[in-house]
């Protein structure tokens, strides 16, 4: 059975505040998960987004190939690319 686990930590320091972005990938057999966690300078979790790996992504990981854009859909949800607020029109 194939097992793979990887964790990458990226830290940023902007305007006197530190943030950490953690990318985590875990594959066990034919199923896999990916996760992006954003923490503030104190270590508190600000946001977390989880997702499933596709068959193509798992196949690339098994062959030790780089998967471009692996965390793109996770990061877009964290940045606020989700549902937009509805606005109400007022007649004049």
Image (spheres, helix red, strand yellow):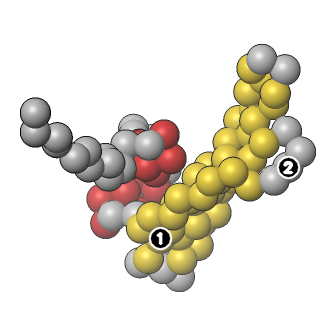
Q: Can residue 70 be seen in this view?
A: no
Cα separation, mark 1 vs mark 2, equals 26 Å
Dot 1: what SS? strand
Local packing at callout 2 (Cα closer than 10 Å; few below 14, some 14-19, many 20+) is few
Residue placed under numbered mark 1 in the picture = 32
The percent position of residue 33, horizontal first and vertical second, equals: 50, 68
The percent position of residue 20, horizontal first and vertical second, equals: 74, 40
Relative side of 92 to 45, left or right: left
Residue placed under numbered mark 2 in the picture = 43
The percent position of residue 39, horizontal first and vertical second, equals: 74, 47
Relative side of 7 to 4, left or right: right
Q: Relative to the observer, which residue lies in front, 78 or 9?
A: 78
Dot 2: what SS? loop
Residue shown at 85% from the left, 49% from the top: 43
Position of residue 15 relative to residue 68, above or below, is above
Residue shown at 75% from the left, 35% from the top: 19
Marks 1, 2: nearer the viewer: 2
Position of residue 58 relative to residue 68, above or below, is below
Residue shown at 41% from the left, 78% from the top: 30
Q: Can residue 77 be seen in this view?
A: yes
Residue shown at 43% from the left, 49% from the top: 77
The percent position of residue 12, horizontal first and vertical second, equals: 74, 27
Question: From the image, which quarter does the C terminus lie in?
Answer: top left
Position of residue 19 relative to residue 51, above or below, is above
């Amino acid at each position: 059975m194939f097992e793979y686990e990887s964790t990458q930590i990226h830290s940023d320091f902007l305007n006197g505040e530190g943030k950490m972005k953690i990318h985590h990938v875990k594959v066990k057999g034919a199923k896999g998960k990916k996760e992006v966690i954003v923490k503030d300078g104190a270590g508190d979790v600000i946001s977390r987004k989880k997702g499933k790996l596709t068959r193509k992504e798992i196949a690339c990981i098994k062959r030790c190939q780089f998967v471009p854009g692996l965390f793109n859909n996770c990061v877009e949800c964290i940045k606020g690319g989700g549902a937009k607020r509805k606005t109400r029109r007022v007649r004049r």
